[in-house]
Image (cartoon, grey):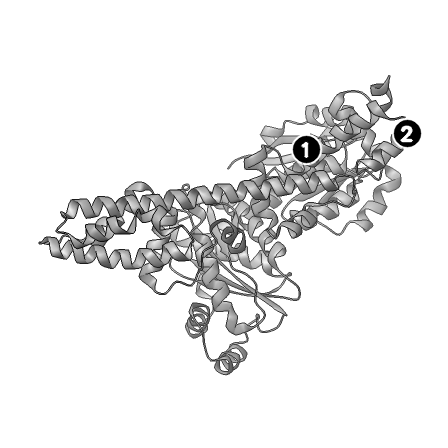
Amino acid sequence: MSLYKIMIVDDEAEVRQAIARKIDWGALGFEIVADAENGRDALEKAETLELDVVLTDIKMPFMDGLTLGAELSRRKPHVKLIVFSGFDEFEYAKKAIKLNVVEYVLKPVNAAELTAILGRVRRVLDEEIEQRRNIRQLTQAYRESLPLLREKFLQEMLRGPMDPKLLEEQAARFGLAIRSGAWKAAAVCTTVPGSGRPAISDELVPVSVRQMLSDALRDLCGYEIVQGVSTILVATAWERDPVESLMRVLGEVCAECERVLGVTLAVGVGRPCQRLEELCRSCGEARAALEYRALLGGGKPIYIQDMERLDRTDLEGDNHREQQLLSIIKFGSPEQIAAMVDKFLGDGEDEWSVQSRAVGMLGILLPIIHRCRLGEEAMLGPRRAWLDLLAEDAPGGRLRDWLLSVCLNMNGCMDQRRISTAKRLVEEAERYIRENYSDSGLSVDRLCDHLHISQSYFSTIFKQETGRSYVQYLTDVRMEHAVELLRTTDDKTYMVAEKVGYDEPNYFSYVFKKRFGVSPTKFRK
């Protein structure tokens, strides 16, 4: 078992260092992966870390331990909190925090007491993981899963359109939890082959993933989960637009799957709808989003609307064969595309057979080219030239090479379009940040609403393009303008702080000193 990851949060560096020195962390099954000197600092670091435990003081500047605990409980509900405080805060802390606090420690922190507490916390964490891995429990959960008829109905409902009246009747008959709620949304999950050696047997991995999904969604929305051979379908019902909440929860499940089971989960998410009979459309979009794991990798949810901004293609092709061909052209390697062309052309015994198959394949490619707005001549070359090639007694090899070049050209064009679109989104994000950095209420939520993309996808492309997180970039922009104001104006520190987006002058001074090594006042001298 790998070591559990812990972060220590206290505004006094001596306290953090003393706690780190006092304990043999490795022997207790822990490793310190970060420390922070206030709640805001801790929350920013927690965004990019996989944590199991946070050990935090209560009294800290800028954001206290209680607020930090509330935020962590919302963003990373699996993280356990150990709170330490002075005598006068102790009972208050125990009453005030109803979050994931598992232990309280009275200051000054005693090594023996903290060792005992960490031992208890480790047992809690071990039991949670063991519960997920327990073969008997998983097998029992599998046997007690929804009856076969209920499962079949859910699969049929998510596969394609059904008569609305029949759908409502059957949903009521089976007592589906997704009947209520103003918004519905579907997701499709699958494990990524070859992503790692599971900590449990392969056949029980989907059972465990299903249980993780159920635990994560239980108190948030109505949901139904259908476990298939290779995929898990998730249908949800919410009272408000669910995209960000669903993406966050599924991101947590992906992280937990990696941490507990040692396998990577790929998740596609469809756009929300408002009627039960529309869930099949959301599920179809979720399946389409899942195909983009070839571009983005697994381990995080992929929202179809984010991907549509890259490709701008109609998801509902005219036939299944066209969709298969489009999928390979979009995501396949050159070798896979070549194999697909060979499969379409077949092993005809005469040139006429190959020629007729080439015409049939072109009949599928042309609608894709037009629908994706790739440009017919740009993809196929001059019309007269390729019409002559199809009309003459051309050798099969020439036709094969030409069709392969067309498909590879389409693949390259779609790749370049995705890259260009992602860059434009990041450039728009940078422009928006630079125009609004002075607003203390500027948040990643507001920015993503402006861009009409999910936070998960935005974080991925922004980090790829800029090498920085949103918070890091915003801080850099604010510090850049703060330096300019300090050099060119006589504004007081609190005025500079307000102009660059900080409503707390003390926190502005803290961030400034952390960045430049001196306070704003000394920087001026």
Residue drawn where x is 54% and y is 46% of the image: 256
Residue drawn where x is 26% and y is 56% of the image: 361
Residue highlighted by disc 1:
115
Cα gap from disc 2 to disc 1, whole angstroms: 48 Å
Residue 513 vs 333, above or below: the answer is above
Q: What kind of residue is marked 2?
A: Lys
Locate residue 333: give its quadrant.
top left
Q: What kind of residue is marked 1?
A: Thr
State whether residue 117 appears in this view: no
Residue 417: image location, x then y, percent:
46, 44
Residue 346 vs 65, above or below: the answer is below
Say which element carries label 1: helix
Residue occupying the far front of the picture:
384
Q: Which of marks 2 and 1 is in front?
A: 2
Residue 74 vs 179, above or below: the answer is above
Residue 510: image location, x then y, percent:
80, 29
Numbered badge on residue 492: 2
